[in-house]
Amino acid sequence: MIKKIKFVHFIPLALAVFVTIVIVIACGRGIPEDVEDPNIRKQYDKAYEKLQDDKDRLSMIAETPSSSSKPGKSSSSDENDDSSSSTKASGSSSSINAQSSSSGAVQSSSSSTESPYILSCVVKVGYDTGTVRKAVPKKNMPEVKCTDKKDPTKVTTLDQETEIFWSNAPRWTNPTEIKNYDDIRARVDSDDNKKPCQGETVKCEGTFRICAEGGCPVPVSSSSTAPSSSSSAATVVSSSSTASAVSSSSRASSSSTASTVSSSSTTAGNSSGSTTYTLACAAVPASGTAGTAITAPAVTCNGTAVSSGLNWTNAPNWSNPVVGEYRSISVSASSGNCSGKTATCSGTLVVSAAPVTYTLACAAVPASGTAGTPITPPAVTCNGTAVSSGLNWSGTPTAPAWNNPVANTYTSISVSASSGNCSGKTATCSGTLTVSAPAVTYTLACTGLAATGKVGESITPPTVKCNGSDNTSTTLNAGLDWPGAPSWTNPTAAEYNVSVTASTGNCSGKTASCGKITVAAANTCAYKPAWCSNIAFKGSKMFAASGALVSNDSKVTGGTAEVNEPFKNEWGNDLCIFVTGANRIQGDVGSTTFTLVNGQAPAALTNGFMSFTTFLNGIQPADGGYYILRKANTWWQIENATGGTLPSCTP
C-alpha cells in the first residue's frame, strides 16, 4: 500500500501550483477576440476550462483545515488521510473513510459533533437552463439555504456568488460546454466562522443544463432526473452511540445515481435497537382559489400522519390563501419523532383570484317631489361603485321623468343596467314617491292703452288679464280700479300715467302698469317732436308716404319700380315717416332701426319680412296713424304702406 502524504506537507506545494494557475488564468482569461477559427476557439476553451477545474480543485485543497486552520473549513484532499483528523466511529478501532480512494471523492473534515444546521441546494424548475458563452443570471443559479434545526423557521438564503464554492458546476460567468450538470455541489465558503452552515457541503437537487444559442437539444439524462421521494425527506437513525458524520461535501461516486446521505441525517453507531424516522410530504394541490381554504398536503413520519407542530416554507396561508404561484414548498416538524426534520413537497400550487359576482343595488326613492321640478333619482351602484349611465327605470304606473316629473304617486320603482359589469341586472328601489302639483301663482297684466286721445272723444280702456303659473289666463272686465287714468268716455286734455288694480278673483289686490296716454284738445295733433329725434311736424325730415318704401335710393325688388324721391340723399339723416298702415316690413337685424313708433318701442326686426301688426307690438295709432323713426345710416323696407298725407291738425 502506498504511503499517504501528510496533508500538512502537501499544502505548500498545492498553494504554489494554485498561485501559478491563478496567474496564468488572470493573464490570459478567455479566448482573444480576433481568433475566428472555430477549431482553435474550441481547443482554447477546453484548455481554459481545464485550468479552471484545476484552480477549483486546488482551491478546495488549499482551504482544507489543518491543525492550525480556521474551524469550519472541510478537507478537500483526494487522498485518504490517516492522521489524527480522520473520522473514527465511536467504539471502533478501524478508520472509516467517507468513500474509497478509487472513487476520487473528497473526504469531508471529521467531527463527531452533528451540525446544528441543515444545508439544502435546489435547482429551480423553470430557471434550470443557461446558454453557452452567456453569463447565467443570478436568479437562475441553484438556490442554497441554511436551516436552523432547532428553529426551522430560521432559514438563511446564501449568496450564490460570494458565499458559495461550487464544484461539478458550469462556469456561471462564462459557460463553455453544452451539457447537463446533475452532480452540482455547493459548499459554504465564508471568512466568518460564525456564519450558519460554514464549511458544510451539499449536493444540489435537480439538473442544470447549458444549451446552445438556438435552444436546448440536450435532454435531461435519466441519471439527472429529480430525486426520489426518499431523497426529499430528512432521515435520522436513532442510536445511543455517537455516529460518524458523512459530510455532504464529499464528491459523488462515478455513478450519478448513487445516493447521498442528507446533511440532516445521522446514522447509529451500531445496528442494535436503531429506528429510522423519515418525514415525508405529499404533492401539493395544483390549484386553489384566493380566499377559499386549501387542504395542505399530507405530512407523515414513518407513514404516520402528522397534523400539528408543522412549519411551512414557501407555502400559502392554507386557511385563507392569496393569489400567487407557490414553488419549492417544504415542511418541518417541531415535535414528535421527526422533530427538527424537513421534507420537500413536490409540485407547484397556483392560487387564482376568486371569480367576481356583480350585484346591482338601488337606494330608496325620495318620498316627495314637485311637478316640473327636477328630482334626484336614487343612487345606483354595481358592487359599491356608482353607476350613472346606461340605466333604464320602470315602476307603477311608470317611473317618473326625473328631470321633469308630473304629478302622480309612483311605487315599485326598479332600475336595470344596460352596460358595464352589471349589464342585464335589475335592482328594486324601496319606498314610494309622491309628486305633487306646484302651487299656482297669479300675475295681473294691462295691455293695449292708446298713446293719444282727444277731448270729448271716448277712449277704449286697455285689456286687463289675470295670468296663472299653470298657463291659465282670465280677462277681467269688472272689479277694476284705474289710478291715474282719464275718463274713458269723456277725457280731458292732459298726459296720463295709467295703472290698474284688481279687487276680485285670483288677482285681487294686485296692480299692473298700463303705460301713458296723451289727451289733446280738439283739432290738435298728438305728435310730439320727442317721438322722432325732435323733428318738427312740418319739418324737412318729416314725410308722409305710401306704396313700397325703402330707406335708400335703390328700387323695390319685386314691386313697382319707384325712385322714392322723398328719401333721396337722406341716408345719413334721421327721418320721421308717417303711415296709416302697411303690409310687411323688414330691416337691419340687430341695428337701432325703428327705435320708436309713436314714441314707443316696437318689436325687434327679424331676418326677412315680418307683418306690420307684429312689428307694432300693440302700439295704438296717434293722429290716425303711426310716426315711425328711422335712424340715420340704417336700411329698411316697408311693403304696401298707406297714408301719403300728414294729419290735418295743429301741431
Image (cartoon, rainbow, N blue to C red):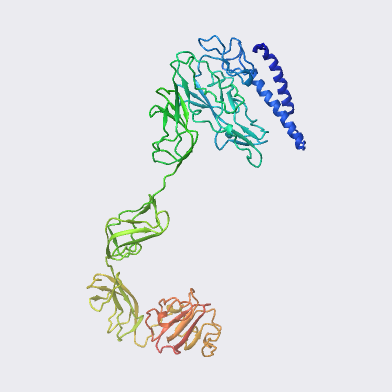
Which one is in front, 210 or 355? 210
* Residue 10: percent from left, percent from top: 67, 14
* Residue 180: percent from left, percent from top: 62, 33
- Relative to 429, say whether 163 is above or below: above
Q: Please name the residue shown 56% across and 38% down the image.
A: 126
Point out the image quarter for the N terminus.
top right
Q: Quadrant of residue 158?
A: top right
Q: How many marks?
A: 0
* Residue 101: percent from left, percent from top: 63, 18
Asked if residue 163 can be seen in this view, the reply is no
* Residue 333: percent from left, percent from top: 42, 26
Which one is in front, 438 or 419? 419
Q: Quadrant of residue 612?
A: bottom left
Asked if residue 56 can be seen in this view, the reply is yes
Which one is in front, 372 or 310? 310
- Relative to 148, say whether 373 is above or below: below
Residue 354 is left or right of residue 26, and the answer is left
Residue 371 is left or right of residue 349, and the answer is left
Which one is in front, 92 or 461? 92
Point out the image quarter for the C terminus.
bottom left
Residue 141 is left or right of residue 234, and the answer is right
Residue 47 is left or right of residue 424, and the answer is right
- Relative to 633, say whether 277 is above or below: above
